[in-house]
Image: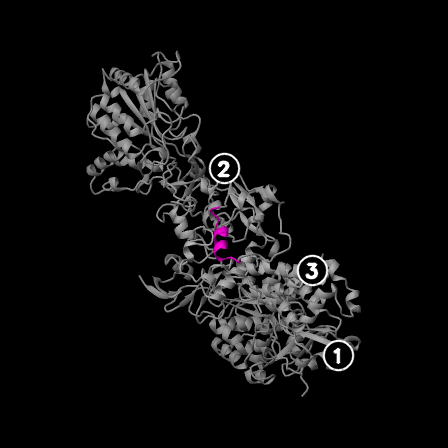
């Protein structure tokens, strides 16, 4: 790789050829502010706050648009740069409402943070601020089904405009009018209609574009825990951060408050889709299963399900499964969602092979759904059709998955057998959101009519299927357990336990292990990592060989408010903002800077 | 030595704009015929030798600009003719296009041949609708006569000229913004580099030239670079159009050499003919609204790029705005900032926010509500804009403030002190602009 060496603030830095000065500075940990630059979209050079002094160049240059050359000498902290930059910050804040206390971005806002560090001590503006849609809360206008727009806060960095044009592929956002009257707008105020619109809140460096989902729900310093995880709502497997809202005084513990994308150049880049971003409420919804449940009577529809203790459910389950399989073990069948993690599938495989021998996997039907995601043709972020994270994991373990991620699962064999009365028991593993195992009304009907004598549902929600079941076992959603999933590229990725399962719900691999043990099988697993270790040993030379070394993160407890506002969303703070909110009179990055430079008064020139 | 006009000699003739007249009286399209017999590079060399400098404002040597146009590329190349004449006080290109359109068409064709382009776009200002009608009709005639189109004059060279009408933005006169607008986007400047010569229209090598610049090209090819250079001072050769406006007896477009001094242009009988009502001269803006003012003492400067620059201003687009003693410096700055605030494209922060702020400050001063701190503030805001923007607009917008503050600070102070303008100003009384701005 060709490299160039340049000097920034006296430090020699070697970067690959083609990097801009700003990128070189960011990589070297030298703080240069920026708004219109975003590593995921094209360079605009319009916000002008990243100006630096480059020797042998007449004017101050925007570092975002200047490519590094050998021997370049760059200064970011000389008096004229500091003063010019402070001048640009003064311009940026002329019309920006100082409503940080009620702005959802307040506390994690680059405009706020960079202004503290690089802006002037005070503004000289004494005219009323420019106002577009009214003041205060009136200024929030609808910006499509997922977003709200506050034009008063906008600093016209045009990141959203470029995001829609370049990443989404449909340039729905534009600027209308010009000069000081410029405003962000969509055609006829129709708002943004896109499958990846939520990213606009992430690219917006101020509180102008906010998702309706996150608005007014929390403050950044009340989100002390952030967990690196992945999204499991489709086969793409976007890397995400699960944000937890919690206060020490809360009895109820932490609560999922939002999902944001985590940078992974190979999978999702800086982005995620709205389905993954906004579909997390079900994990903490009212329909969650919190206790095992039993139907007292064996005849269907006679008695309602009643909560029971695990210790009472397990023997009942064992007896009824043994009973159903007494004549033909193959009449016990499994319907498994591709939302199941590879650990769960691995345990399940050992379970069915223990019961049925080597072709036990034939008793398992893997299911998932597909949906049509309409996106512009030129989009750079394609959301796949398959709505399950682990079809490839099931395939790798030897389960039949038909066309795999490319098509629909084939449930006809199971359905024919059930409807013909050849199946005595169906055990369903459904750890995904409601509907993610497809249409199972035929199974519900078979149980209701008595064609199917036993239905066991191990799931997370009180679905129609669970309501028809004889035994319901509360499992866990993806944010409540450590699990690995194999996405459509064949990449093995980790999803981490961010919150505790509700009530008496157990991790699904654990439930399967207990079921297997009660049926007399040997399962030497105490933790989910034991399962991964066994999996790794059984599949040397594959993507699973290192499964037991995958990193599962835990919420990082906050030690002070400074850390609380930005703990583990590392890619963002390291690579996007490079900034920490300053503590009064002292900011980390100003360490070592002479005292008179730490505050930047705008003195009258000339 | 009396100067013989070459660009505008026949402007007053009733049918001076027609193809027949052009061919008969102006040796029309002989330059093109001569050029097609030469190698493209020879034409560039001739233009370089002539010292022709861009007439749009920056005065950059045209031959050099053409030489920068990438040669070894599979991409098509383009000539963009900048006819978005929007600089306040400038109205010369419009005369050329309306009264001598074939000179421009011939210039476009020769320039295309020189840089290896096959298409020239004339980006015409939105308000020049009547000019566009004339131009397009004459382009049609040129096509019919075989001066444009396929296999021009049997040389095998193809060239098309299209007229594209702008939507009325001053910023579209900036070369990269012009290209953006031509591509159908908002007229906002691009980051340079890459310069248009490398990646311009549709990311292809492009030369953007002013109307008057291109009109000079046939003359250079026809009469030779030495003739052209001999017309003016060193490095400032050729004929030059001057647009004189303001408080003069005969405002208008005058063609002369750049030997002519500002005093001759303002007071000369063959030019503007002196101050209206014989009121005293106060100041002159020599190059369109974006350049610093010059005073009486500077009037003996020859109106050439280099001399005016030495005097502390710029020739720019050669729009001479002459002002008598009734013009208040604060009002002047406010009036110009009203224009710049309205025309700022809004891309760069300093210009977008700064022009608005400057205008508000100037309006407050002009209305008599100014405070002493406003003067320092005006200066501070202006210097915060200068040099911090993508294109030259920011510098241009701050210039009226910085220049008037430098030359007429007393008037600013009087506005603060007295709460009103202290100039005897009958002309201003008849033009209550402040009310209109509010």
Label 1 marks a residue whose chain is B
Are the numbered discs 3 and 2 placed on the same chain, yes or no? Answer: no
Disc 1 packing (10 Å; few <14; some 14–19; many ≥20): many
Q: Is there any visible trace of residue B288 in the rendered image?
A: no
Which label is found at residue B364?
3
Residue A361 placement: quadrant: top left
Which label is found at residue B274?
1
Q: How many marks?
A: 3
Secondary-structure class at tag 1: loop
Please check the rendered image and state whether residue B261 is part of the magenta-colored stretch, yes or no.
no
Q: Are marks 1 and 2 in contact (CB under 8 Å)?
A: no
User: x and y percent of residue B340 in the render?
Assistant: 63, 62
Secondary-structure class at tag 3: helix
Pick whichever, B374 or B141, lies toward us: B374
> The magenta stretch spans which residues?
A107-120
- What's the image's color scheme? one colour
Pick whichever, B384 or B336, lies toward us: B384
Label 2 marks a residue whose chain is A
At x 65% / y 63%, what residue is drawn? B374
Q: Nearer the viewer, mark 1 or mark 3?
A: 3
Residue A362 placement: quadrant: top left
Are the numbered discs 1 and 3 placed on the same chain, yes or no? Answer: yes
Please check the rendered image and state whether residue A113 is part of the magenta-colored stretch, yes or no.
yes
Label 3 marks a residue whose chain is B
Disc 2 packing (10 Å; few <14; some 14–19; many ≥20): few
- 3D distance between C-alphas at marks 3 and 2: 43 Å
Furthest residue in direction bottom, as rendered: B1
Which residue in the structure is indicated by mark 2? A217
């Amino acid at each position: 790789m060709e490299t160039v060496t340049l000097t920034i603030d006296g430090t020699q830095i070697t970067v690959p050829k083609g990097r801009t000065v700003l990128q070189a500075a960011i990589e070297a940990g030298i703080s240069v502010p920026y708004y219109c630059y975003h590593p995921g979209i094209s360079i605009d050079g319009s916000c002008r706050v990243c100006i630096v002094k480059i020797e042998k160049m007449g004017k101050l240059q925007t570092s975002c648009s200047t490519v590094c050359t050998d021997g370049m000498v760059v200064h970011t902290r000389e008096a004229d740069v500091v003063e010019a930059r402070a001048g640009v910050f003064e311009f940026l804040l002329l019309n920006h409402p100082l409503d940080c206390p009620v702005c959802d971005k307040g506390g994690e806002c680059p405009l706020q943070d960079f202004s503290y560090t690089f802006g002037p001590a005070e503004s000289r503006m004494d005219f009323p601020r420019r106002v577009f849609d009214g003041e205060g809360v009136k200024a929030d206008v609808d910006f499509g089904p997922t977003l709200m727009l506050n034009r008063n806060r906008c600093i016209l960095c045009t990141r959203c405009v470029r995001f829609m044009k370049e990443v989404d592929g449909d340039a729905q956002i534009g600027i209308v009018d010009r000069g000081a009257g410029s405003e962000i707008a969509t055609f006829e105020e129709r708002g943004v209609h896109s499958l990846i619109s939520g990213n606009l809140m992430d690219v917006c460096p101020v509180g102008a574009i906010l998702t309706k989902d996150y608005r007014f729900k929390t403050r950044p310093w009340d989100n002390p825990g952030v967990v690196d995880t992945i999204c499991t709502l489709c086969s793409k497997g976007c890397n995400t951060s699960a944000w937890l809202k919690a206060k020490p005084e809360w009895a109820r513990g932490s609560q999922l408050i939002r999902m944001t994308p985590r940078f992974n150049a190979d999978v999702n880049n800086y982005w995620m889709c709205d389905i993954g971003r906004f579909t997390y409420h079900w994990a903490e919804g009212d329909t969650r299963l919190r206790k095992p449940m039993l139907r007292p009577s064996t005849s269907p529809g006679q008695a309602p399900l009643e909560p029971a203790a695990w210790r009472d459910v397990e023997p009942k389950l064992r007896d009824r499964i043994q009973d159903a399989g007494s004549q033909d073990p193959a009449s016990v069948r499994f319907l498994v969602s591709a939302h199941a993690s590879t650990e769960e599938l691995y345990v399940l495989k050992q379970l069915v092979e223990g019961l049925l021998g080597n072709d036990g996997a034939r008793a398992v039907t893997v299911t998932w759904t597909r949906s049509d995601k309409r996106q512009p043709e030129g989009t750079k972020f394609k959301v796949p059709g398959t709505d399950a994270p682990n079809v490839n994991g099931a395939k790798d373990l030897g389960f039949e998955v038909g066309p795999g991620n490319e098509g629909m699962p084939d449930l006809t064999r199971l359905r024919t057998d059930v409807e013909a009365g050849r199946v005595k028991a169906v055990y369903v593993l459904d750890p995904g959101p409601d509907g993610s195992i497809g249409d199972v009304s035929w199974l519900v009907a078979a149980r209701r009519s008595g064609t199917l004598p036993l239905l066991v549902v191990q799931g997370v929600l009180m679905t129609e299927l669970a309501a028809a079941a004889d035994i319901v076992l509360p499992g866990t959603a993806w944010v409540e357990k450590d699990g690995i999933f194999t996405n459509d590229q064949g990449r093995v990725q980790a999803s981490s336990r961010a919150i505790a399962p509700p009530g008496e719900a157990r991790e699904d691999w654990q439930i399967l292990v207990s079921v297997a043990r009660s049926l007399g099988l040997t399962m030497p697993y105490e933790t989910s990592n034991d399962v991964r270790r066994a999996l790794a040993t059984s599949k040397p030379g594959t993507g699973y060989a290192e499964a037991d070394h995958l990193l599962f993160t835990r919420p990082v407890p906050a030690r002070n408010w400074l850390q609380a506002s930005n703990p583990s969303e590392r890619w963002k703070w390291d690579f996007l903002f490079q900034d920490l909110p300053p503590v009064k009179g002292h900011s980390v990055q100003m360490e070592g800077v002479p005292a008179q430079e730490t505050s930047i008064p705008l003195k009258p020139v000339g | 030595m009396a100067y013989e006009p070459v660009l505008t000699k026949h402007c007053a003739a009733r049918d001076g704009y027609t193809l027949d007249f052009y061919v008969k009286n102006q040796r029309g399209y002989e330059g093109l015929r001569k050029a097609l017999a030469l190698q493209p590079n020879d034409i560039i060399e001739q233009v370089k030798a002539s010292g022709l400098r861009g007439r749009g404002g920056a005065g950059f040597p045209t031959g050099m600009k053409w030489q920068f146009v990438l040669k070894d590329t599979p991409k098509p190349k383009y000539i963009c003719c900048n006819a978005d004449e929007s600089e306040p006080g400038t109205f010369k290109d419009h005369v050329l296009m309306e009264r001598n359109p074939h000179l421009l068409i011939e210039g476009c064709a020769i320039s295309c041949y020189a840089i290896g382009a096959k298409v020239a776009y004339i980006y015409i200002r939105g308000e020049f609708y009547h000019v566009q009608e004339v131009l397009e009709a004459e382009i049609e005639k040129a096509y019919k006569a075989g001066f444009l189109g396929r296999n021009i004059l049997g040389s095998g060279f193809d060239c098309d000229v299209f007229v594209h009408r702008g939507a009325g933005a001053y910023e579209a006169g900036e070369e990269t913004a012009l290209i953006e607008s031509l591509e159908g986007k908002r007229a906002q400047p691009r980051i340079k580099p890459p310069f248009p010569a490398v990646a311009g229209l549709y990311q292809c090598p492009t030369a953007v030239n002013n109307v008057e610049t291109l009109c000079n090209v046939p003359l250079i090819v026809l009469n030779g670079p030495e003739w052209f250079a001999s017309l003016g001072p060193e490095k400032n050769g050729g004929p030059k159009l001057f647009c004189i406006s303001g408080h003069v007896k005969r405002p208008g477009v005058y063609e002369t050499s750049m030997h002519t001094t500002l005093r001759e242009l303002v007071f000369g009988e063959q030019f503007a003919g002196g101050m209206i009502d014989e009121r005293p001269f106060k100041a002159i803006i020599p190059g369109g609204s974006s350049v610093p003012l010059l005073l009486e003492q500077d009037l003996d400067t020859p109106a050439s790029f280099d001399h005016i620059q030495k005097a502390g201003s710029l020739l720019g687009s050669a729009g001479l705005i002459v002002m008598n003693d009734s013009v208040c410096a604060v009002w002047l700055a406010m009036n110009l900032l009203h224009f710049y605030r309205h025309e700022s494209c809004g891309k760069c922060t300093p210009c977008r926010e700064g022009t608005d702020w400057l205008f508000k400050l100037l309006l407050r001063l002009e209305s008599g509500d100014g405070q002493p701190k406003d003067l320092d503030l005006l200066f501070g805001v202006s210097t915060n804009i200068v040099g911090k923007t993508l294109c030259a607009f920011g510098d241009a917008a701050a210039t009226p403030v910085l220049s008037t503050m430098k030359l007429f600070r007393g008037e600013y102070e009087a506005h603060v002190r007295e709460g009103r303008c202290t100039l005897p100003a009958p002309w201003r009384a008849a033009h209550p602009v402040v009310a209109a701005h509010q």
